[in-house]
Image (spheres, helix red, strand yellow):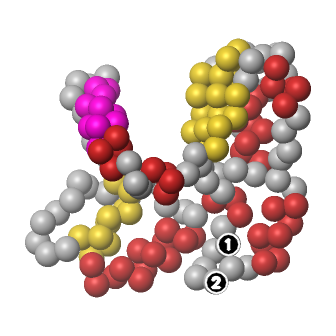
Amino acid sequence: LGAKDGEEACVDVVLDGIGGTSFEASLSLLNVGGRVVHFGGSEYASPGDRPNWLHIVPRWLRRPRVDPGSLVSRSLGVVGFNLIFLTDRVDQLSEEFDQLLGVKYKGGGAAPPLVGKTFPFEEAPDALRYLQSGASVGKVVLQVGENRPLGPLD
């Protein structure tokens, strides 16, 4: 991923929840004045329910380093974001989430959530393993009772 030699950058903002190697690709996609908002590091997560240090440590040691001077020529910015530090500002978050949920998409109205896979509540451990596998795309939903959530993609 990322802009290839001779290709134009194409986005103003990248929300990066992966980190690691995707970070450099994210920077290459930015237009002049663009921003990368880094909010997670799923590249460092290991499959399964226990940390696999042989998986984590090499990725951590190869994580990208940014020279602030390299950002200046294209007025790029990198921001780190952790929602946990905003939990004491619930009123502010509620207002901002309401605004976000009110955003319209091309089809008109609010964009529905992307549901990737639905599991019956009784299969919650399988749903968790699926999340940990890194294969999930969209929301992973636990169905409780007879109510059906939005249809899965699979």
The answer to which of 108 and 82 lies nearer the viewer is 82
Q: Is residue 93 above or below residue 2?
A: below
What's the residue at 60%, 22% (across, down)? Answer: 12
Rendering coords of residue 125 (x, y %): 41, 83
What label does residue 46 carry, if any? 1
Compared across the picture, whether 132 is left or right of 97 comes to: right
Looking at the rendered structure, the secondary structure element under dot 2 is loop
Highlighted magenta segment, given as a residue range: 94-105
**Amino acid type at mark 1:** Ser
Magenta stretch encompasses residue 43: no
Quadrant of residue 153 within the rendered picture = bottom left
The residue that appears at 66% across and 57% down in the rendered structure is 41
Left or right relative to 19: residue 109: left
95, 5: nearer the viewer: 95
In which quadrant of the rendered image does the N terminus lie? top right
- The picture places residue 101, in percent across and down from the top left corner, at 29, 37
Mark 1 falls on what kind of element? loop
Q: CA distance from mark 1 to mark 2?
A: 8 Å
Residue 140 seen in the figure: yes
**Quarter of the image where the C terminus is located:** bottom left
Is 5 situated above or below 22? above
Residue under the image location 19 percent in, 74 percent down? 144
Q: Does residue 102 belong to the magenta stretch?
A: yes
Residue 50, numbered circle: 2
Residue located at (88% from left, 26% from top):
69
Neighbor class of circle 1 (other Cα within 10 Å; few <14, some 14-19, many 20+) is some
Give the x, y percent position of residue 122. 28, 84
Determine contact: label 1, label 2, CB under 8 Å: yes
